[in-house]
Image (cartoon, rainbow, N blue to C red):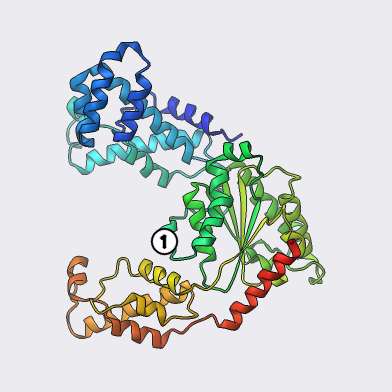
Amino acid sequence: GVPDKQGRKEILQIHTRGMPIEPDFRKGDVLKALEEIKKDEKFKDAIDKAIERVKASREEEIPKVLKEISEDLYNEVKAKLIDYLLEELAEVTHGFVGADLAALAREAAMAALRRLIREGKIDFEAETIPREVLDELKVTRKDFYEALKMVEPSALREVLIEVPNVHWDDIGGLEDVKQELREAVEWPLKYPEAFRAYGITPPKGILLYGPPGTGKTLLAKAVATESEANFIAVRGPEILSKWVGESEKNIREIFRKARQAAPTVIFIDEIDAIAPRRGTDVNRVTDRIINQLLTEMDGLVENSGVVVIAATNRPDIIDPALLRPGRFDRLILVPAPDEKARLEIFKVHTRNMPLAKDVDLKELAKRTEGYTGADIAAVCREAAMIAMRRALEQGILKEGMKADEIRRIAKVTMKDFEEALKKIGPSVSKETMEYYRRIQEQFKQARG
């Protein structure tokens, strides 16, 4: 089977034995290690002195400070820091089997070797590599994280897996929605003992609904990134197959792989395509898919560490059986952003944009009533393209110019944004939002 966190740590310890690991001497970790070592009588006299000196030192000075106090103490702290590093790696390698972890250790060592080659410290003409060069070969935390980009968990190789790189900071506004998702997904994965202590069963499923372009997919990616869970993205129509039984098999396989690589977020986009009300499909294909989904989510098979997030802009046509507590426990409306949220979205999308002094984001937020997050992203992109077009026409931009120089001389102005607003209009009307609010009320009454 797939090893748990403790099993992964033990496998990593085996495959990194004898490897010249150089951990990060981060002040917080060093102080934590010293507090643990304090219990050892051998270092009793040196510990207090070490703690005081580490607190007063910069991080890059800490190894030297510890060596000056005691070489043995330095080695003991280093061993603790390596242990913390392996625990950290065990935490983020969900779904990795023994062979994957061996490949991870090997790839990290190769990353360290490639670094020496880039620095020109290894001469390929020479018959042997000098001892002093080999002594410089240190495998760092950064090398392990470089290796993680290349080694993927075997348990997820057969399904579509995505490693999102979306954080809460990348999503402007939607604070209430973000908080609900944190509570429903992040908290159960990060604080399982707290849920046990309070006797709470974590939600199995969350349905995000709202107008197109409001950020439902982005929210699902952010929650997977922030909770450090694996992420399986499923587009609703992809599950459908013309072969009898194949669609249900696809659902079973997705859940099986997710359980193997738990904690996992399964994200089903456009769920209305595979789970409309039963009885509406003449061929009964979607009826069988819904039955399979109900079976997987209903607790007949334990979904420990697996959370299903679904998104739709047609919640009214989804089969009611899926929407009851115990399946999709939380039904969250993702609304079109209000003025405050629009300002935050403008800030996100102009974060790396060279803005002229006359650009007033507050004014733009006021003027974009009915614009979704996707609309605002399109406005910012169009404004930047207009500015680039102008700079090319005026001969300001030339081939070979560096990005910093371009940012300094070719700014995006308020006029560029005004031109962009003429081209890109709002995609959500008051009537559309009223429609979703009515559905929200219907859901509340159905569960009330």
Measured along the vertical axis of the image, is residue 263 above or below residue 292? above
What is the x, y in percent for residue 279?
82, 69
Measured along the vertical axis of the image, is residue 11 above or below residue 177? above
Looking at the image, residue 57 sits to the left or right of residue 150; the answer is left
- Quadrant housing residue 410: bottom left
Towards the viewer: 113 or 79: 79
**At x 58% / y 43%, what residue is drawn?**
262
Mark 1 nearby-residue class (10 Å; few <14, some 14–19, many ≥20): some
Q: Is residue 166 visible?
A: no
What is the x, y in percent for residue 218?
50, 62
Q: Amino acid at mark 1?
A: Asp
Towards the viewer: 86 or 47: 47
Towards the viewer: 444 or 162: 444
Towards the viewer: 403 or 422: 422
- Assign the N terminus to one quadrant of the image: top right
**At x 50% / y 34%, what residue is drawn?**
99
Q: How many marks?
A: 1
Residue extending farthest top: 42
Q: Is residue 117 visible?
A: yes
What is the x, y in percent for residue 405?
17, 69
Residue holding disc 1? 170
**At x 63% / y 37%, what residue is drawn?**
196
At mark 1, the secondary structure is helix
- Assign the C terminus to one quadrant of the image: bottom right
Measured along the vertical axis of the image, is residue 356 above or below residue 39? below
- Quadrant housing residue 303: top right
What is the x, y in percent for residue 387?
27, 80
